[in-house]
């Protein structure tokens, strides 16, 4: 009962801060951005210390769910200007409690990592916004405007929080292992880099979700690799990853946001499983980039959403394995990569077919690259791609009995992608040139939906493809067992 009394005090305390901020903003005619940052910092401080206030995570989970619901309503109803009326559309007030919900639900037993992750969002993120707003050296790594000065502020404050926070918390909790000053400095630099990069590619307040999660995962990854003696390998991968994505960016294989996203995904995967786990992902990225490059001018640069569409599910299974080791996680990782490789190779190799592809379950010929279309050459490419991943899995993990199942998982996933592409994926008509496109903007004008679901774009289809590949191989292995 005492725990829930503390919960009630915190809940109504946060509501009081919201109400007071709104009254102050209206009374003194303050800009919404200033009161929003005040609320952000106050709430962040309170939420960060919850693991030291509550004995179990039920209260923090309940608090997160309540504010996800409350803030969703406030945004949809355009209420509380001190929280939501800023210069750009932002869903940060929903993303923030969502990040707290995820960390509190699955990682309650890691209070130091949680505490520092929320503190980074609480102080470093507002500093980046405040400094960036006054800076003239702005650029667009993705969709939201960022600045070099703002990123430097984010990096610096994150570095300070991790540097002093780690030392203070380690002494307070009497940590089981000793961290020397050089190691803490390296840890702080590593976390500051990852947190700053995740903030760079945020959009509409998504940094309120990605910054604490990336900070938490990178913090845990560094410490585990340090205690297991693998830190030098992590540093080598960072250097190699920078070289790979810098080269890919210069060759126009990825956009800036795609390079940053790919770098962060690589850190998560390598940090979770080392060279064995990263090898299939390297093969997928490099082989896909080479095939795409062979297409010449028709290729497009992969942005962060395309990187996440193919790499999000594998990264999830890698992180799941890192915290909760199991064969299922490894199989899900390989199955999702098999499907991603099969689909990508089908598209890239199918481009070289001399005949036009045909819509799935139809003999109607369409232009190359059309969603829902398949060709004999593309289908062979699909089988080759998933088979290569299966061979790599057999050599690295001795999954020889899964060569055929992994190949089939990739092929089925790619075919499922084609079916979604034809029947469910959104397609639009450009009112200027009258062509059918998958883009909502064409010829600098909004397009008109002609078929499919408006929210089912190509990236979401690719995501479902990788998810299906993972599900198929996990179930096949279950029946084998």
Image (cartoon, rainbow, N blue to C red):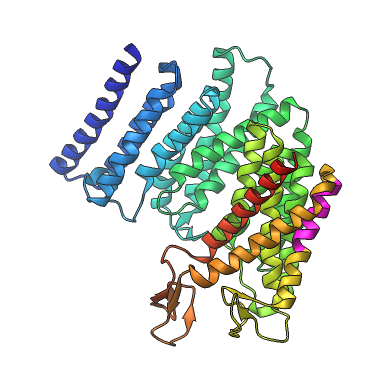
- Left/right placement of residue 347 relative to residue 139 reads right
- Give me the residue at 24% from left, 31% from top: 15
Locate residue 452, reporting x and y percent. 44, 70
- Outermost residue toward the left? 27
Nearer to us in this view, 307 or 140: 307
Q: Which residues are magenta?
A: 385-395
- Give me the residue at 75% from left, 57% from top: 407
What secondary structure characterizes most of the magenta part? helix
Q: Quadrant of the C terminus?
A: top right
Nearer to us in this view, 215 or 344: 344
Locate residue 296, reporting x and y percent. 70, 78
Total number of numbered discs in the rendering:
0
Residue 144 lies, with reference to residue 73, above or below; the image says below
Residue 25 lies, with reference to residue 424, above or below; the image says above
Residue 3 lies, with reference to residue 411, above or below; the image says above
Whether 394 is among the magenta residues is yes
Q: Quadrant of residue 20?
A: top left
Locate residue 240, reporting x and y percent. 76, 50
- Left/right placement of residue 191 relative to residue 406 reads left
Whether 460 is among the magenta residues is no
Residue 426 lies, with reference to residue 477, above or below; the image says below
Locate residue 471, reporting x and y percent. 63, 49
Q: Quadrant of residue 94?
A: top left
Nearer to us in this view, 69 or 144: 69
- Left/right placement of residue 275 relative to residue 449 reads right
Q: Is residue 81 something that shows in the picture?
A: yes
- Give me the residue at 71% from left, 44% from top: 331
- Left/right placement of residue 320 relative to residue 156 reads right
- Give me the residue at 73% from left, 82% from top: 353
């Amino acid at each position: 009962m005492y725990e829930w009394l503390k919960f009630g005090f915190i809940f109504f305390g946060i509501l009081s801060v919201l109400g007071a901020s709104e009254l102050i903003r209206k009374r003194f005619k303050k800009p919404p951005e200033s009161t929003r940052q005040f609320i952000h910092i106050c709430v962040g401080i309170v939420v960060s210390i919850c693991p030291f206030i509550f004995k179990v995570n039920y209260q923090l989970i309940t608090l997160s769910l309540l504010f996800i619901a409350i803030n969703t309503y406030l945004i949809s109803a355009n209420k509380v200007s001190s929280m939501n009326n800023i210069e750009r559309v932002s869903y940060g007030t929903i993303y923030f409690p969502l990040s707290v919900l995820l960390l509190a639900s699955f990682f309650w037993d890691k209070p130091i990592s949680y505490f520092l992750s929320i503190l980074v969002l609480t102080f470093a993120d507002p500093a980046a916004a405040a400094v960036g707003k006054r800076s003239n050296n702005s650029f667009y790594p993705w969709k939201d405007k960022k600045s070099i000065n703002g990123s430097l502020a984010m990096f610096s404050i994150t570095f300070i929080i991790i540097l002093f926070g780690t030392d203070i918390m380690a002494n307070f909790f009497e940590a089981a292992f000793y961290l020397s000053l050089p190691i803490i400095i390296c840890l702080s630099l590593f976390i500051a880099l990852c947190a700053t990069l995740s903030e760079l590619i945020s959009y509409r307040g998504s940094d309120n979700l990605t910054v604490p999660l990336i900070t938490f995962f990178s913090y845990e990854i560094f410490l585990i690799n340090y205690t297991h003696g693998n830190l030098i390998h992590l540093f080598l991968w960072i250097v190699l990853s920078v070289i790979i994505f810098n080269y890919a960016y210069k060759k126009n294989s990825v956009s800036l946001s795609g390079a940053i996203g790919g770098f962060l995904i690589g850190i998560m995967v390598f940090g979770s499983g080392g060279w064995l786990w990263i090898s299939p992902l390297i093969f997928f990225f490099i082989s896909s980039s080479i095939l795409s490059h062979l297409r010449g001018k028709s290729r497009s640069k992969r942005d962060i959403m395309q990187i996440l569409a193919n790499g999000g599910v594998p990264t999830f299974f890698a992180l799941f394995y890192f915290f909760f080791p199991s064969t299922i996680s490894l199989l899900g990782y390989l199955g999702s990569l098999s499907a991603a490789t099969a689909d990508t190779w089908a598209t890239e190799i199918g481009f070289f077919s001399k005949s036009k592809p045909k819509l799935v379950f139809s003999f109607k010929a369409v232009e190359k690259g059309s969603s829902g279309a398949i060709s004999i050459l593309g289908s062979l490419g699909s089988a080759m791609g998933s088979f290569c991943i299966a061979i790599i899995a057999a050599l690295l993990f001795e999954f020889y009995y899964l060569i055929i199942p992994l190949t089939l998982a990739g092929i089925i996933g790619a075919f499922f992608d084609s079916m979604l592409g034809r029947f469910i994926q959104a397609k639009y008509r450009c009112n200027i040139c009258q062509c059918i496109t998958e883009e909502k903007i064409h010829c600098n004008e909004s397009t008109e939906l002609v078929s499919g679901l408006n929210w089912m774009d190509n990236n979401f289809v690719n995501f479902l493809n990788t998810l299906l590949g993972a599900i198929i191989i996990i179930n096949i292995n279950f029946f084998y067992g």
